[in-house]
Amino acid sequence: MLEKIVFLILSAVTLGSGLVVVTQRNLFRAALYLVVALIGVAGLFVLLDAGFLGVVQVFIYAGAIAILIIFAVMVTRRVMYPNVPQTNTQWAWAAGLVVILFVILLLTLAPNEISLPIGNLTMGGVNWPEESSDAPAGLVELGKALVDAEKYVVPFEVASVLLLVAMIGAVYIVFPKRDTAPSPADDADAQAEVEEE
């Protein structure tokens, strides 16, 4: 019973913050709500006894990727202005497409076959397993593969280096440009300060 209550709370938090992400007009606040949605997904992973995926979700997505998105939003000063429109004119088309894709996904994943009035098309009928006991063993193998030199440790480290390069590039973009050579006016001011002393 307690698991169901926690599941409902986490689902409400995840879906609610995800809805705010796509409806929020302020891009910075939308990025903050994205962090909340990703943490909610991590909680759902923990409820599914996939603790490793929950930790990866918090560290990589809610930690690194979301902070990188927030940092990129703050670096691009133009989107932080309140008078700049935060939405485009095609939001209605996008919303309609999302609803259509959601209906197709529901019809595809339905446990029973559904006959559609379009020709002889049937969708659904997925044979869902009752219980899977292989998940923890698969997570152990995934964890070992991520740190194994012969498997995925090199792509894992390359991704971390790419994130580091992106952060350094963002910091470089933030700093204002300065001329390296001082102007004659600066030389005159410096000389006047020396003469006064």
Image (spheres, grey):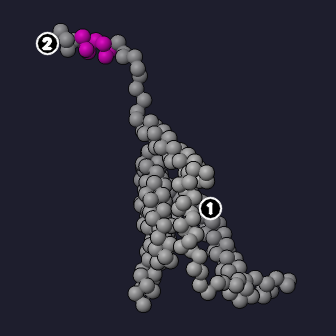
Q: Residue at x 64, y 75 (%)?
A: 102
Tell me the quarter of the picture where residue 134 sits. bottom right
Three-letter amino acid code at the position of disc 2:
Glu
Which residue lies at the image location 55% right of the left edge and 57% below the top edge? Answer: 146
Secondary structure predominantly adopted by residues drawn in magenta: helix
Name above or below for residue 192 compared with residue 49: above
Residue at which label 1 appears: 90
Identify the secondary structure beneath mark 2: loop
Residue at left offset 48%, top offset 55%: 65
Badge nearest the viewer, 2 or 1 = 2
The x, y position of residue 147, in whole percent, is 53, 54
Which of the two residues, 112 or 26, is positioned nearer the viewer here? 112
Q: Position of residue 15 (x, y in %)?
A: 49, 74
Q: In percent of the image, x 59 and y 53: which residue is there?
A: 152
User: Disc 2 to disc 1, how far (Cα)?
Assistant: 65 Å
* Mark 2: few/some/many CA within 10 Å (<14, 14-19, 20+): few
Q: Earlier in the sequence, mark 2 or mark 1?
A: 1
Spot occupied by residue 36 in the image (x, y as percentages of width and height): 42, 66
Left or right, 144 with respect to 179, comes to right
Q: In the rendered structure, which segment of residues is drawn in magenta?
A: 185-191
Image quarter in which the C terminus is found:
top left
Q: How many marks?
A: 2
User: Disc 2, disc 1: CB below 8 Å?
Assistant: no
**Residue located beneath label 2 in the image:** 197
Q: Is residue 48 magenta?
A: no
